[in-house]
Amino acid sequence: MRWIEAIYEPTTLFSLKPSWATSSGAKSLLLPTPYAVKIALLDAALRVDGLPQARSAWPWLRSLGLAVRLPEQIVVTNLFTKILKLRRNRAESGAADAGPYQKSIAYREYVFLAGPVNLAVGIPADAPADVRQEQLIRWLLNINYLGKRGSLIQLRRPPASLDTLSDHIMLTEASTRFPLLGLAQQIDDCDEQMTFEQADIYDSKRPKRLVRTVVLPYRLIRSSRSYSLYERLG
């Protein structure tokens, strides 16, 4: 694979629930998933180059290799917050929260990444000949959030070619080596047969995802009722 690395600085707290989680509450993942990154690239392709170009690029976009290097320390804050959710039953006449939505409480986690996130993107060897490195770089330049909307990031420097992966965490390939004291995370990716229509949020077809488990080289250092501090091993 030809690897391209983009380094992003988080400008807000990061949050991304697993794809199988409910809306009422779930722990946040500590990193953007391959699915989130590939859909972000597809969104950038649509905005920058238009629908025909994005549609033709989707088959190799969904096959991109991905690896990430996270900062040395990660802090997760957790809280209960008030939310509005779609009402299932009709509200009683004169109720304080009458209307299509009702008040509820949900559990939320927000992740503070104490440093930059190095995202390495690998173009598969069997990608079409007309796939240009400049094309992927242009889309990487136009990503401004990863994960849940509001998890904003800012590019630190222009993406550049990467000869080898050093201590990046491989996200799209099964690894036979992982730290015994590491932290397991279930992340989702695009299925190899996922079509452009299934990636289109305006289409009725449901996305086809696959789930894999990765072990992050991090361990829990300190925790309390409202936060958890993780630190990179080694």
Image (tube, grey):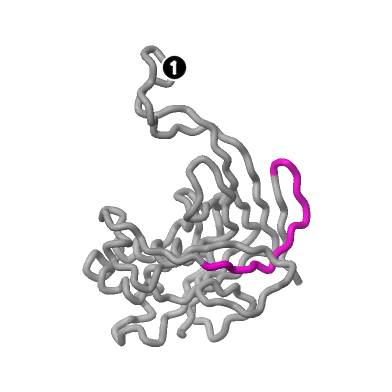
* Magenta residues (range): 212-226
Q: Quadrant of residue 52?
A: bottom left
Between 158 and 184, the one lying in front of the other is 184
User: Residue 38: x percent and y percent?
Assistant: 41, 66
Between 165 and 141, the one lying in front of the other is 165
Q: Is residue 142 visible?
A: no
- Secondary structure that dominates the magenta span: strand
In the image: residue 54, left or right of residue 103: left
Between 4 and 16, the one lying in front of the other is 16
Where disc 1 sits, the SS reads loop
Q: Quadrant of residue 230?
A: bottom right
User: Residue 92: x percent and y percent?
Assistant: 38, 16
Which residue is pictured at 55% across the width and 52% down the height?
Answer: 14
Q: Which residue sits furthest front?
A: 89
Q: Which amino acid type is marked by label 1?
A: Ala
Q: Which residue sits furthest top?
A: 94
Q: Is residue 170 visible?
A: yes
Which residue is pictured at 54% across the width and 37% down the height?
Answer: 106
Q: Indicate yes or no whether the magenta region holds residue 220.
A: yes
Q: Quadrant of the C terminus?
A: bottom right
Between 124 and 155, the one lying in front of the other is 124
User: Residue 155: x percent and y percent?
Assistant: 49, 63
Q: Is residue 202 above or below residue 126?
A: above
Which residue is pictured at 65% across the width and 46% down the height?
Answer: 77
In the image: residue 178, left or right of residue 81: right
Q: Quadrant of residue 169?
A: bottom right
User: Residue 129: x percent and y percent?
Assistant: 31, 87
Q: Indicate yes or no whether the magenta region holds residue 132.
A: no
Is disc 1 surrounded by few (<14), some (14 to 19) or many (20+) residues within 10 Å?
A: few
Residue receiving disc 1: 96
Which residue is pictured at 67% across the width and 75% down the height?
Answer: 178
